[in-house]
Every structure is written in structure tokens, then in C-alpha cells.
Image (cartoon, rainbow, N blue to C red):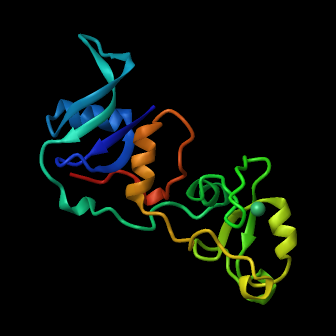
């Protein structure tokens, strides 16, 4: 079970284990915003398992770092909301493919700016060509998603399909 930590101004800052969240609550560094429908028991008492907590003091060092979302095939699909970035067709984990905007054979890299979610049809139509050569226009310019976006989504569907985060997102303070 994971807990979402909000800064004192309610901005999502990171995801921690519920154990870490309990420590923040019991040391009164944070307050409970929302609980899971489950209890944790200690020898003397029981507590609601925290789903979302809010820090009491504003922590500046929790700067929302762009780039904390791991680059992966799945996260590219999520960023593009499982829509083909050429024809806007709705895809799934099974039908989505990765298109390299500048093909790998022409020096294109595996990164946020050069890969998009793409349907099989558009991918094979584009083939080994750049968008200029294929005259196929992207619906939007791909960018590295901001953690802010990822966490907002995580907040909305907290128990659902989670983003994959970098290891360095582990809670370190306060
Ligand atoms: Zn398509």
C-alpha cells in the first residue's frame, strides 16, 4: 500500500510506503487527508491506513522535478493517453506500438522527445522515414511529462494503473 504525500499547499510531492506515512502522522509532521478503508493495528490501538497525507510545514526541497517519471514504453503510452499520435485512434496496451519520430536507423533515440504512441497502421505507413519525408503530422509535440501531471493522475486513480517512478523518488525528508 502506498500513500500520496501532499505539500502544505496541497501540491502532490511524492509517493511513500504507508509505513513511512504512519511515521509522519505519528510524529505530527503530517495530517491525514484521506484514508484507505482498512485499519493498521498496533498493540494498543488501531489506525486508518493513510491514502493521502498533507505535510504541516511547506517543504521547498520537494521541488516538482520534471523528469522524475521514468522513460518507458508504458509511460510513453500513458503520456499519449493511449492514442495514436498520428491518426488519434484509441489504442490499448496490446495494440499500441512505439514510433520513433526520427527512426533509430537515422540516429533517433529512445527518449521522451523522439517516441510516441502509434497504431500499427500508422507505424507501418510511416516506416523508416522522418515525419518530413512521410508527410505525416504529429497531433502534438511529444515532451517529457512533468511529475505534477503524473501525480495528479495518480491522485485521481490512486489504486489503478500507476506510473512507474524513478528510484530516487524515495522519500528522504523532512
Ligand atoms: Zn494511427
Left or right: residue 107 versus residue 60 is: right
Seen from this angle, which residue lies furthest top? 44
Quadrant occupied by the N terminus: top left
Nearest the viewer among 57 and 90 is 90
Which residue is painted at 23% across and 46% down in the image? 10
> Residue 32, located in which quarter of the rendered image?
top left
Image x and y of residue 77, in percent: 64, 56
Left or right: residue 19 versus residue 53 is: right
Left or right: residue 51 versus residue 107 is: left
Task: Tell me: residue 120, above or below residue 34.
Answer: below
Nearest the viewer among 3 and 149 is 149
Which residue is painted at 50% across and 32% down in the image? 159
Looking at the rendering, the quadrant in which ligand 1 lies is bottom right
Image x and y of residue 42, in percent: 30, 16
Counting labels gives 0
> Residue 5, located in which quarter of the rendered image?
top left
Task: Tell me: residue 130, above or below residue 50.
Answer: below
Task: Tell me: residue 67, above or below residue 93.
Answer: below
Image x and y of residue 28, in percent: 14, 34
Which residue is painted at 72% across and 50% down in the image? 91
Which residue is painted at 53% across and 49% down in the image? 163
Image x and y of residue 3, in percent: 37, 37
Task: Tell me: residue 95, above or below residue 156.
Answer: below
Amino acid at each position: 500500500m502506498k500513500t500520496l504525500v501532499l505539500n502544505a499547499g496541497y501540491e502532490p510531492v511524492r509517493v511513500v510506503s504507508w509505513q513511512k506515512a504512519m511515521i509522519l502522522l505519528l510524529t505530527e509532521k503530517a495530517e491525514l487527508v484521506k484514508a484507505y478503508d482498512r485499519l493498521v493495528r498496533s498493540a494498543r490501538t488501531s489506525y486508518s491506513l493513510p491514502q493521502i497525507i498533507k505535510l504541516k510545514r511547506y517543504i521547498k526541497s520537494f521541488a516538482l522535478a520534471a523528469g522524475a517519471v521514468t522513460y518507458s514504453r508504458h509511460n510513453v503510452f500513458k503520456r499519449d493517453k493511449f492514442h495514436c499520435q498520428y491518426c488519434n485512434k484509441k489504442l490499448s496496451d496490446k495494440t499500441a506500438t512505439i514510433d520513433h519520430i526520427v527512426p533509430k536507423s537515422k540516429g533517433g533515440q529512445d527518449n521522451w522527445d523522439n517516441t510516441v504512441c502509434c497504431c500499427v497502421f500508422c507505424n507501418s505507413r510511416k516506416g523508416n522515414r522522418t515525419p518530413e519525408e512521410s508527410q505525416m503530422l504529429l497531433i502534438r509535440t511529444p515532451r517529457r511529462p512533468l511529475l505534477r501531471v503524473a501525480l495528479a493522475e495518480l491522485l485521481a486513480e490512486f489504486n489503478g494503473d500507476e506510473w512507474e517512478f524513478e528510484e530516487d523518488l524515495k522519500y528522504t525528508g523532512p
